[in-house]
Image: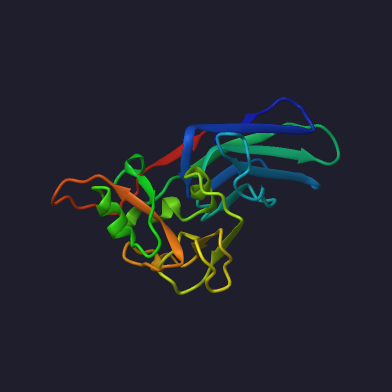
Amino acid sequence: ETCYQSEVSSQSWWEADLGSDQFIRDIVVFFKELEENDLLLVSVKDTHGNNVTETLKADKSLKSTWEAVNTLARYVRVETVSLKRAKRLTLCRVNIFGPQVWPKPHLLQTLVSDAGESCSDSCTRHNMTCEYNFFPLINNKMAFKQNSINCTEYHDVEMYKDVFPSYVQSKDNGFVAGSCVTTKINELLSCSGRHTSYLRLCPCRHYRKGQVALPVELYFKTYI
């Protein structure tokens, strides 16, 4: 396999620009074996260059995989840090996986429901339909920011409620008003859930009568 080297530096880097914020599911990086005391770091950044996840650290093997990154981002940056001396960053391949979803993500229209309103009702009120397959695109911290929702706190929970992702309007289950909550239990993502304490983040899309959406693998990008 062909690999590519950077200039000699104590902190060499390579970056993929996806063109706009895209949903990233998994990242796989293939590289030359690291020497002792060397680090390979992967940063996932939004359009403004801000990190949207914790920095990912590779192990010493020739391939590192990060599954369920599950965030919206524009840039994926790979860099090497050598604690001993300047050296080259040698990359062989970087795979960035998108979501397993259909319809295409650009059809997503995110709405914020009224308190006590389901996503089905909220989307219908705006002449759209709630698209269940789009929930993974908005079940993350970045989605609140992109929809101009200021979260005083953020929680990603394993709780058996079918109203997340949501903005907490009034205190409930230990969540203070102003909190943003997502769920780790994908099976509980629901178009029908509702609760008077929550404003739901809803994945809507325009549709034609009788149209049906099926989940498929949408895209897969390979860099280098």
Q: Is residue 166 left or right of residue 103?
A: right
| Above or below: residue 213 compared with residue 9 | below
Identify which residue is drawn at 58% across, 44% down: 29
Colour approach in the figure: rainbow
**46 relative to 140, above or below:** above
- List x then y, in percent, for residue 213: 24, 52
Q: Is residue 130 visible?
A: no
Q: In which image quadrant can residue 173 be found?
A: bottom right
62 and 53: which is toward the camera: 53
Horizontal placement of 154 versus 20: left or right? right
Residue 21: tell me if it is visible. yes
Camera-side residue: 182 or 198? 198
Q: Is residue 162 above or below residue 67?
A: below
Where's residue 35, x and y in %?
Answer: 77, 44
For the N terminus, the quadrant is top right
Task: Indicate the quadrant where residue 10 lies.
Answer: top right
Q: Is residue 85 left or right of residue 65?
A: right
Give coordinates of residue 95: x percent, y percent: 50, 42
Residue at left 36%, top 52%? 203
Does residue 176 appear to the left or right of 127 in the view shown? right
Residue lying at 35% horizontally and 49% vertically, measured from the top left: 217
Q: How many marks?
A: 0
- Residue at 68 percent across and 52 percent down: it is 59
Residue reaching furthest to the left: 210
Q: Farthest residue to the top: give it.
A: 7
Q: Nearer the viewer, residue 165 or 104?
A: 165
- Occupied quadrant, residue 131: bottom left
